[in-house]
């Protein structure tokens, strides 16, 4: 089965697939012939929350071409759950987020994920579990574009320790939320965070507008 990809550019979404996904929102198919990813991103301007798709028999090949036009940045983060069954969220740059960060030189994804959660919230991770998903996000970088690849992991924390937000990283709040409270962050968060929550089974499909029939966040 061909891999399928979802790339976020601000609030816009670019799907790469071998067929049209089932969406509740409109989607615009792009011409794959001569497609220029940098020009496409530049042309988006301030438009947001629109869906685009590139369709071809080999989605991986299309994705690799897109990746070559960007500088790849690797990051990792986690969805941490306390012994009381509540989930760790941070408030950074005026949006709800999950702790994450870039890899240090020579660092493995799974190690970086734990380090970032611990550093950004002042806690100890007792157990790192399975990888939930992988997300892709594009943003301007050094006069060009960066493609951030983030691996997300489920984590466990003993008890429910007091959280200490890392202020120097722009984190102003760190909180524990119950599963019932988690959907409230959807009005002010990033699409990639929605992917993580969906992969963790914390969101009913009915509240995820625009989610395609295939998972855009890759597990592989």
Image: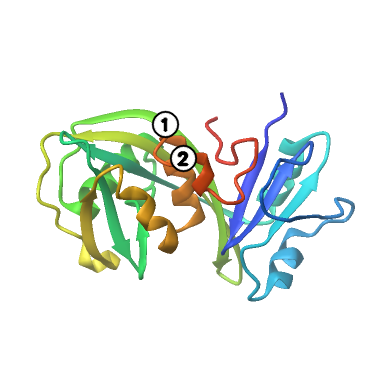
Tell me the mark number nearer the camera, choosing from 2 and 1.
2
> For residue 165, which numbered disc appears in the image?
none
The residue located at (53%, 48%) in the rendering is 208
Q: Is residue 174 left or right of residue 146?
A: left
Give the quarter of the image for residue 113: top left
In the depicted structure, whether residue 98 falls above or below residue 203? below
Q: Nearer the viewer, residue 68 or 11?
A: 11
One can see residue 83 in this view? yes
Q: Neighbour class for label 2 at 10 Å: few (<14), some, many (≥20)?
A: few
Q: How many marks can you see?
A: 2
Helix, strand or loop at label 1? It is strand
The quarter of the image holding the N terminus is: top right
The quarter of the image holding the C terminus is: top right
- Residue 77, how many percent across, how many down? 36, 45
One can see residue 74 in this view? no
Residue sitting at the far top: 1
Helix, strand or loop at label 2? It is loop
Q: Is residue 68 left or right of residue 215?
A: right
- Residue 110, how many percent across, how many down? 36, 35
Q: Which residue is mark 2?
A: 204
Residue sitting at the far bottom: 46
Residue sitting at the far front: 206
Q: Nearer the viewer, residue 129 or 39?
A: 129
Q: Is residue 220 left or right of residue 50?
A: left
Q: Nearer the viewer, residue 70 or 130?
A: 130
Q: Which residue is mark 1?
A: 131
């Amino acid at each position: 089965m061909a891999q399928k990809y979802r790339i976020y550019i601000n609030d816009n979404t670019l799907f790469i697939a071998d067929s049209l996904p089932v969406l509740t929102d409109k989607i615009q198919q792009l011409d794959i012939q001569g497609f220029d990813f940098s020009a496409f991103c530049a042309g988006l301007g301030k438009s947001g929350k629109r869906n685009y798709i590139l369709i071809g028999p080999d989605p991986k090949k299309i994705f690799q071409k897109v990746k070559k036009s960007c500088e790849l940045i690797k990051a990792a983060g986690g969805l941490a759950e306390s012994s009381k069954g509540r989930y760790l969220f941070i408030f950074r740059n005026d949006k709800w987020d999950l702790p994450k960060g870039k890899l240090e030189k020579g660092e493995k994804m799974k190690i970086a994920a734990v380090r970032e959660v611990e550093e950004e919230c002042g806690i100890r991770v007792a157990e790192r579990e399975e990888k939930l998903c992988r997300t892709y996000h594009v943003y301007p970088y050094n006069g060009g574009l960066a493609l951030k690849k983030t691996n997300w992991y489920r984590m466990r924390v003993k008890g429910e320790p007091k959280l200490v937000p890392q202020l120097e990283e722009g984190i102003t709040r760190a909180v524990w939320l119950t599963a019932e409270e988690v959907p409230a962050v959807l009005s002010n968060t990033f699409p990639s965070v929605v992917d993580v929550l969906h992969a963790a089974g914390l969101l009913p499909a009915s509240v995820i507008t625009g989610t395609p029939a295939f998972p855009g966040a890759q597990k592989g």
